[in-house]
């Protein structure tokens, strides 16, 4: 599978995937007219507004499109086709297997941002054996260690609310995906901070892949 024809980074933690004739968005955020794709399925990782927004979902969702998200993100009846997820949730979408996995903070200084008790998630999306892991907002947690056979791991490294670059590099190396893709950092770190984080990640992660956003960044340096 050619990753650059399957996985597209919108910016921040927002991606879309094109596979099996379907388009799956993850955490749509700051969607501009540059994004022409429409979603057959939207996956939401957690309730924070830079990941879960009714307005942003409506911008990309097809009329009959489906939404999957954890409890507390959206009203259960806000979309026609709506399913609740939590860690351990599994489903099949047009032959694409989707597993929800835990995402939470363990560092004391940020534990209140993404508490484990909220049952917020990341997702493993299996496309004909090529597995894409979107980690959501998380620290390097024990539940990452059993993840194996991944084609791509999408890992936050902005610090403050999630892993910093060093922690994300440790997670990437423990997971051992074919591609380790950093996300959720540019708006938080600015130009200099982002460049430094990328340098750390590149030096420490052999299989690092830095994707280019497919729309103009919403942040300015």
Image (cartoon, rainbow, N blue to C red):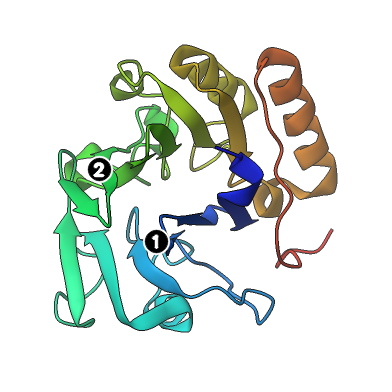
Secondary element under disc 1, as helix, strand or loop, is loop
Residue 196 appears at what percent x and percent y?
80, 31
Does the residue at mark 1 contact the one at mark 2 (Cβ under 8 Å)? no
Image quarter of the C terminus: bottom right
Residue at image x 44%, y 38%? 132
Report if residue 11 is visible in the image: no
Image mark for residue 48: 1
Q: Nearer the viewer, residue 97 or 55?
A: 97
Report if residue 25 is visible in the image: yes
Residue at image x 41%, y 34%? 131
Secondary element under disc 2, as helix, strand or loop, is strand
Mark found first going from the N terminus, 1 or 2: 1
Residue at image x 21%, y 50%? 92
Residue 191 appears at what percent x and percent y?
83, 47
Mark 1–mark 2 Cα distance, whole angstroms, equals: 17 Å
Image mark for residue 100: 2
Circle 2: is it few (<14), some (14-19), or many (20+) Cα within 10 Å?
A: many
From the viewer's perspective, is 64 left or right of 28? left
Q: Nearer the viewer, residue 157 or 91?
A: 91
From the viewer's perspective, is 133 left or right of 114? right
From the viewer's perspective, is 154 left or right of 86? right
Residue 43 appears at what percent x and percent y?
34, 59
Q: Residue furthest bottom?
A: 63
Number of numbered discs: 2
189, above or below 77, in the image? above
Image mark for residue 198: none
15, above or below 208, in the image? below
| Foreground disc of the pair 1, 2 | 2
72, above or below 130, in the image? below
Q: Nearer the viewer, residue 149 or 190?
A: 149
């Amino acid at each position: 599978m050619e990753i650059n024809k399957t996985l597209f980074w919108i910016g921040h933690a927002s991606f879309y995937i094109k596979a099996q004739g379907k388009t799956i968005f993850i955490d749509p955020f700051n969607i501009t007219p540059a994004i022409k794709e429409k979603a057959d399925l939207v996956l939401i990782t957690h309730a924070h507004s830079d990941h879960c927004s009714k307005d942003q979902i409506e911008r990309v969702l097809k009329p009959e499109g489906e939404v999957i998200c954890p409890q507390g993100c959206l009203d259960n009846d806000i979309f026609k086709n709506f399913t609740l997820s939590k860690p351990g949730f599994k489903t099949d979408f047009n032959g694409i297997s989707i597993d929800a996995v835990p995402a939470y903070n363990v560092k004391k200084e940020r534990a209140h941002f993404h508490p484990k008790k909220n049952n917020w998630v990341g997702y493993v999306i299996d496309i004909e054996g090529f597995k894409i892991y979107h980690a959501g907002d998380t620290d390097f947690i024990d539940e990452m260690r059993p993840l194996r056979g991944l084609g791509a791991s999408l890992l936050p490294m902005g610090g403050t609310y999630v892993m910093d670059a060093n922690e994300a590099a440790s997670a990437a190396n423990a997971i051992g995906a074919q591609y380790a893709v950093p996300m959720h950092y540019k708006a938080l770190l600015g130009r200099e901070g982002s460049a430094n984080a990328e340098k750390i990640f590149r030096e420490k992660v052999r299989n690092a892949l830095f994707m280019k956003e497919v729309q103009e960044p919403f942040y300015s340096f």
